[in-house]
Amino acid sequence: MEPYQFRFIMLGDSTVGKSSLLKRYTEDLFLESINQTVGVDFYVHFLEVEPGVRIKLQFWDTAGQERFRSVTRSYYRNSVGGLLVFDMTNRASFDRIKEWHAEVCERVQPHKVLFVLVGQKSDRDTHGERMVSREEVEKLAGQLGVPYVEASAKTGQNVRESFELLARRVYQGLLSGEVELQEGWDGVKCSSPQFVSSVHHSDIES
Ligand SMILES: Nc1nc2c(ncn2[C@@H]2O[C@H](COP(=O)(O)OP(=O)(O)OP(=O)(O)O)[C@@H](O)[C@H]2O)c(=O)[nH]1
Ligand SMILES: [Mg+2]
């Protein structure tokens, strides 16, 4: 039994590869012709974040297309983590990251969402198609206070690392008290609440 359930949301413009990242992570598959997401899709993956601590990760895979925004917005509030995804070969998708970040932060108040910024399609960098330099992204990541990872759903590079970095951030947040379990909020759930206090306890003792 896994004591925790974390809800994560995929954010970013259409075609940046949000669904492709999830397919790679949950099924180890890549499709050249994957359907555009309509509204919101749902994925699940289990992660042992440390020996004996299994976490059920639930992912809301949102459609990047503007016409679905009213639907996808309603999923922000019950998410504890967000993957902010852009395509490094698509300048406009990088320019929009600030807006995605601001929109989510504004709508989840008083809750907080922890983010990871993912520069997608790194396989195309070797073909000279990169439109955003790493320095530029790192500057933005610093401003937003989020870690940055370059990944490729196509080759699988850094895909697992991106998701697990976020899961570990949330888990650390729970241990430190930065992330709190709250009645009526589905961002984090614990199937055995005494588990949380025992984790806190052993953390203090060690
Ligand atoms: N070269 C390359 N292509 C990719 C990569 N990831 C996704 N793609 C391609 O990019 C296109 C869009 O991928 P999706 O995963 O559907 O993008 P999305 O962000 O889910 O798009 P929406 O559902 O419309 O928001 C597809 O043709 C994918 O095959 C990658 O890492 N490298
Ligand atoms: Mg999609």
Image (tube, rainbow, N blue to C red):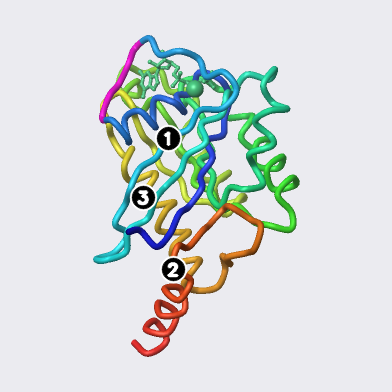
Ligand 1 shows up in the quarter that is: top left
- From this view, report whether residue 96 is shown above or below residue 187: above
Task: Please state which amino acid type lies under the numbered disc 1.
Answer: Tyr
The residue that label 3 is drawn on is 164
Please tell me whether mark 1 sits on a helix, a strand or a loop.
Answer: strand
| Residue 80 horizontal/vertical position (percent) | 56, 52
The main secondary structure of the magenta stretch is loop
- Name which of mark 3 and mark 2 comes first in the sequence: 3
Name which quarter of the figure residue 66 lies in. Answer: top right
Mark 3 or 2, closer to the camera? 2
The reply to whether the magenta stretch includes residue 124 is no
* Crowding near the residue tagged with mark 2, few <14, some 14–19, many ≥20 C-alpha atoms within 10 Å: few
Name which residue lies at 42% across and 53% down. Answer: 167
Disc 1 to disc 3, C-alpha distance: 15 Å
Task: Please state which amino acid type lies under the numbered disc 3.
Answer: Glu
The residue that label 1 is drawn on is 43
Please give the range of residues in magenta: 28-32
- From this view, report whether residue 90 is shown above or below residue 148: above
Name which residue lies at 36% across and 34% down. Answer: 151
- From this view, report whether residue 195 is shown above or below residue 47: below
Disc 3 to disc 2, C-alpha distance: 22 Å
Task: Please state which amino acid type lies under the numbered disc 2.
Answer: Ser
Would residue 7 be found to the left or right of residue 27 on screen? right
